[in-house]
Amino acid sequence: MRKEHVTVNGREYQFDSYAVQANGQRLHIVEAGEGPLVLLVHGFPETWYAWRYQLVALSEAGYRVVAFDTRGYGRSTKPSHYVDYRITELVADCVGVVDAVGESKAIIVGHDWGATVAWTAAWLRPDVFTAVAGLANVFGGRDIGALPFNPDGKKRPSEIAAEIGGDDKWFYQDYFSYHDSQFAIDQMTPDVRGWLRDGLFSWSAGPELPAEARDTDFTKLNDEELLAFLRAAGPCVTKFGDWREEAMTTPKQLPPWLTEEDLDVVAGSFEAGGFHGGLCHYQVLDLNWELLANIDEKITVPALYIGSDRCAATIWARDAVEKLPERCPDLRGVVILNDCGHWQQLEKPDEVNAHLLDFLAHTR
């Protein structure tokens, strides 16, 4: 067993770090604390390190907290075939981790793609996951991306992506998956650190909004306005264009939540392991939609959603947010953080931790 050393709010912490065998995969685990198990599932482009603030806060509050590199990321195995990244396998990985650390039940918390996995895990395996909290990505039933203009999930994700992109643009999911993701990989790998820096900053609340947009409540756009927003903003790129050049901003200085040391950790992980595994998740969206057909779209365990006013995933999922009370009968709250982008647990860690701890305290 090794130790992971991180600095949070000026203090250094160390967490246990080890590997487990789960669902036929070697998965890298980082753990802190003792008590009821909380499983943290990261998104793209992240690793367990995205949960450093929560590892501290939740473990100090009396929980056993486990964050792990999901398959395709960090020091976990990276299957080569995209089919191995279907949502049912990712859920089985989570179940396997719970078993591998010697537990039978856990509360599961996810962000971005990890939220999609967490929602689906609580949906399909309530016998294991006794409560769920999702950050950024909303539960959308079989439409696990909770895409816009598809409240009942009747359309395939690829169909929605084509409608958003139109004739001349790609919705980012198509950009990430085109030509087995190689098109995006070829643009990302020459400067991994720069791509990650600009991407993380651009999807945060850091970039200055145009004057005409500063007072806009993006969560209340009508369908026409929402489509225009998605096509003009970061989620879309000109077909065969360079997403970084077209839609990302290079920060003049890094925000407080993203230090040079943080970038060293994140960039080092992707420089070593590449982007292929993470991008495979975007190649199975239609397959996931097919796998999840004809299942009652209800999460029966206690649930919490945390989004934010500057997060595109919150903005485009307004239909899914409205349906959360129906899809999650034991919904304990919908929190929309102000002046916050896509990386809620990093941009607003104190607020996120407070909401998570309150949720956890009432589900024990």
Image (cartoon, rainbow, N blue to C red):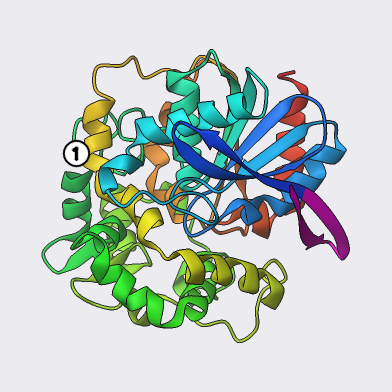
Q: In the rendering, at what x and y percent does residue 249 appear?
A: 48, 79
Tally the numbered discs. Answer: 1
Give the image quarter of residue 218.
Answer: bottom left
Residue at 62% x, 72% y: name it.
Answer: 263
Q: Is residue 238 left or right of residue 220?
A: left
Circle 1 is placed at which residue position? 156
In magenta, the rendered stretch is 1-15
Residue at 80% x, 47% y: name it.
Answer: 56
- Which class describes the residues within 10 Å of circle 1: few (<14), some (14-19), or many (20+)? some
Q: Is-magenta flag for residue 13?
A: yes
Front residue of 363/1: it is 1
Q: Magenta stretch mostly in which secondary structure?
A: strand
Q: Is residue 303 visible?
A: no
Residue at 28% x, 48% y: name it.
Answer: 82
Q: Is residue 225 above or below residue 328?
A: below
Give the image quarter of residue 86.
Answer: top left
